[in-house]
Image (tube, helix red, strand yellow):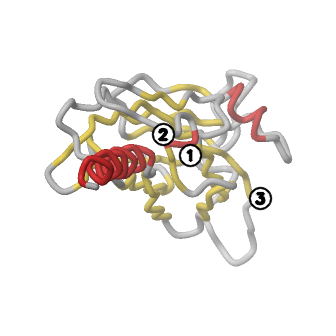
Amino acid sequence: MKPTIRPIVLLLISFLLLNGHAMAQRISFGLYAGEGILLEPMGLAELNFNTKQPLIFASQSVSILKQDQASAIIRITGRLDQEITASISASPTLDLNTSHIPLSIRFAYYNAGAASPSDNEIKATAIELPLGFSSFTFPFKKNLTGIPAPPPTPINSNYTSPQGTAYLVIYGNLGPVPSDAAAGYYNGDINIRVEYATN
């Protein structure tokens, strides 16, 4: 009887460990907007690397690219005549107790001014920032003339600025997974703060 029980127990343990690797490796967003700015996720409210690769094992890396369905889009709505500054902070790792998996996050922005761009259009034409950038300033609508835009009209009771919409695309790379990483649910946070530029 014992020889039969031992392989079943080992098989069960192996199965549980395999399931542990399959648990989600995801990052949630913390969104903070300055006065008069609205931030909202479009569809996905997190990056989930398991949507790209369901099982992630030791020594592997998984990348969510800008154009992938798993990349996340954040819509920014505010005064069209203003520039905005986005500041983004993310942990360099996803964590589970004392186990850590390296993480690098990338960003791109879309400000082409299209009324209702599709997710594919946003991701295909968003301007990628070099790796390492954590704060950047851009106008709500790209200036195609090359002439500097006029200064914004001061806020007063007789004037309401037209509203503009821009988008952030968030993606990145997880790994390589350390050989001693525990199986389980790794998570982390990305904090995104958007406010009107003060230059």
Give percent across and percent down for residue 5. 30, 54
Q: CA distance from mark 3 to mark 1?
A: 13 Å
Could you tell whether 184 is left or right of 37 in the image?
A: left
Could you tell whether 151 is left or right of 9 in the image?
A: right
46 or 151: which is nearer to us?
A: 46
Of the two numbered discs 3 and 2 in the rendering, the one whose residue sits closer to the viewer: 2
Element under disc 3? loop
Is residue 169 placed above or below 155 in the rendered structure?
A: above
Residue 83: mark: 1
Q: Residues within 10 Å of mark 1 (few under 14, many from 20)?
A: some
The single residue placed furthest to the right in the displayed view is 115
* Residue 26 shows up from this direction: no
* Residue 41 shows up from this direction: yes
Mark 2 — residue? Answer: 137
151 or 140: which is nearer to us?
A: 140
Q: CA distance from mark 3 to mark 2?
A: 19 Å
Residue 162: mark: 3
Q: Residue at x 51, y 47 (%)?
A: 47
